[in-house]
Amino acid sequence: MLILLTNDDGIRAPGLVAMYRELTSLGEVHVVAPETVQSATGHGITLSTPLLTQRVTVEDTFTGISVDGRPADCVKLAVARILPRRPDLVISGINSGANVGINVIYSGTVAAAIEAAFLGLPSIALSLYLRNEIPLDYARTASFAMKVVRQIVAAGLRGGQVVSVNIPPLRKEQSPTGVKIVRQCTNAWIDQYEERTDPRGRPYYWNRTVFHLGATDQDTDVAALRDGYITITPLQFDLTYYPMLREWKDRVWMVE
Amino acid sequence: MLILLTNDDGIRAPGLVAMYRELTSLGEVHVVAPETVQSATGHGITLSTPLLTQRVTVEDTFTGISVDGRPADCVKLAVARILPRRPDLVISGINSGANVGINVIYSGTVAAAIEAAFLGLPSIALSLYLRNEIPLDYARTASFAMKVVRQIVAAGLRGGQVVSVNIPPLRKEQSPTGVKIVRQCTNAWIDQYEERTDPRGRPYYWNRTVFHLGATDQDTDVAALRDGYITITPLQFDLTYYPMLREWKDRVWMVE
């Protein structure tokens, strides 16, 4: 099994390294990932500037290719030029930070996985929910992630299908409450900005929103992750809103 | 009517200026747009760096606020801090370049409109399909866009709803074939990269894909725009793929 591993935190991120170590039990893992941190870049791509690449050895664990581009660029370029053949599976992560609710749209981790699905490949985005009071343990997170990845593969994830997996932060003695298949919470997230003045008297604004998993319906990714579950959300890349399409289909529109 | 006008080509882009001129007939237009070109940034947001803002007067036509951030930042910041009250309508564009098919996902223009819908506002993304052999005429494009915007508002576009409008390039004597409500084409778009070597012998890759509207089903945005129609596609920001959610709902998942 040929596996492409990428992320949006950069090729040296501990979440990627930990996941690499787990994935080698499943197949031949090729890493093509951004040179630098690309968090919250969303589904951007690089069109007008070239993509520099470099062979990088990380923690004596793997030698991969770093790309000075965005997560979706890494997937495009890996599939078009770098990998010896089309991969059987694409893994993006483990991201440091949850990708649930509205963050699904902003996430570079998810964008890379969606890009792979565009290209007809089966793909999985992996993210870890961070909480300050719980120490990070990527090795343990990756071992839980791997159990879920194996089951998703066994369930028959097909080319063009993409799922996003979020893992709760766990203290040493804790296990996840369970695994839940849940929808994306679409509640609005209202950002707060602090206004300041720069040394030249010009105003600037700083986003001071602290992400937390708030109140929401019980069947969503936000609620399940908050309650300690590993969440699995199947995603799509058809943004058409069909109910409105049907409603507006027969309206008469004028252009003159 | 208070209208927020933004884009991803930057506050001085001719498509935005032309649309400003049209929109003043509909209400009070406030421009909050990126300082620099942000094409293909997707739905990125700025979290860790501050957003500098500046009052900018463009072509003696309007004075707006430029933000050194991404399209979605502009909408967030405008709604949270800059506008005197919540806008009644958000317009993003006119983008120079079509946002149909897979480009819907990459588009900063669409991301700004989707961000507005997140925040519970009605919003419309506007894009012009560019073809080299047809001279650009933003004033004429904006006048067609305005006709469509008026009809969308009259149709009762609600808070939280977002539509993407694409306009074909037109020669002086031409009119659009008509207006079509169509779904997003989700066909894969295979990018091609040219490999080169930098002066230090390192490889780099350049995306050489030329966007064109290819063969696809007749009911899609790509087909209709190619055939000279103005296209309207209602969009959503729930990326959950429900058929798979239902299929996987009752599977048993193990974490130990």
Image (cartoon, coloured by chain):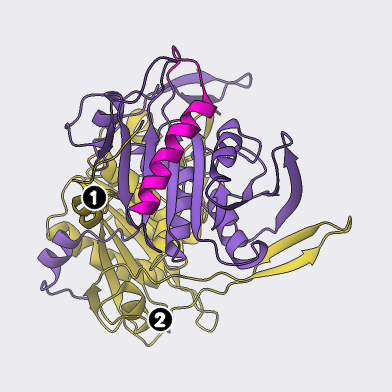
Chain colours: A yellow, B purple
Is A104 situated left or right of A2 in this image?
right
Whether residue B198 sits left or right of residue B135 in the image: it is right
Residue sitting at x 40%, y 14%: B173
Work out whether mark 2 precedes mark 1 in sequence or the reverse, and give the earlier one: 2
The crowding category of the residue bearing disc 2, from other C-alpha atoms within 10 Å (few below 14, some 14 to 19, many at least 20), is: some
Expressed as whole percent of the image width and height from the top left, the position of residue B145 reads 44, 37
Circles 2, 1 touching at the beta carbon (< 8 Å):
no
Disc 1 residue type (three-letter): Trp
Query: Which segment did they paint magenta?
Result: B131-154
For the residue marked with disc 2, what is the amino acid? Answer: Leu
What residue is at 39 percent from the left and 52 percent from the top? B153
For the N terminus of chain A, the quadrant is: top left
Give yes or no for residue B141 being in the magenta stretch.
Answer: yes
Mark 1 nearby-residue class (10 Å; few <14, some 14–19, many ≥20)? some
Q: Which residue is mark 2?
A: A170
Q: Is residue A8 left or right of residue B179?
A: right
Disc 2 to disc 1, how far (Cα)?
48 Å
Q: Which chain letter goes with mark 1?
A: A
Residue designated by label 1: A248
Name the residue: 30% across, 79% down: A229
Q: Position of residue B70 (x, y in %)?
A: 58, 49
Query: Position of B83 compared to A169: left or right?
Result: right
Farthest residue in the bottom direction? A173
The foreground one among A75 and A253 is A253
Q: Is residue B183 magenta?
A: no
Comparing marks 2 and 1, which lies closer to the viewer?
1
| Residue A169, quarter of picture | bottom left
Residue A129 image position (x, y, % from top left)? 43, 72
Residue B47: percent from left, percent from top:
60, 61
Q: Could you tell me which quadrant the C terminus of chain A lies in?
A: top left
Picture residue at 43% right of the left edge, 81% below the top:
A214
Q: Is residue A208 visible?
A: yes
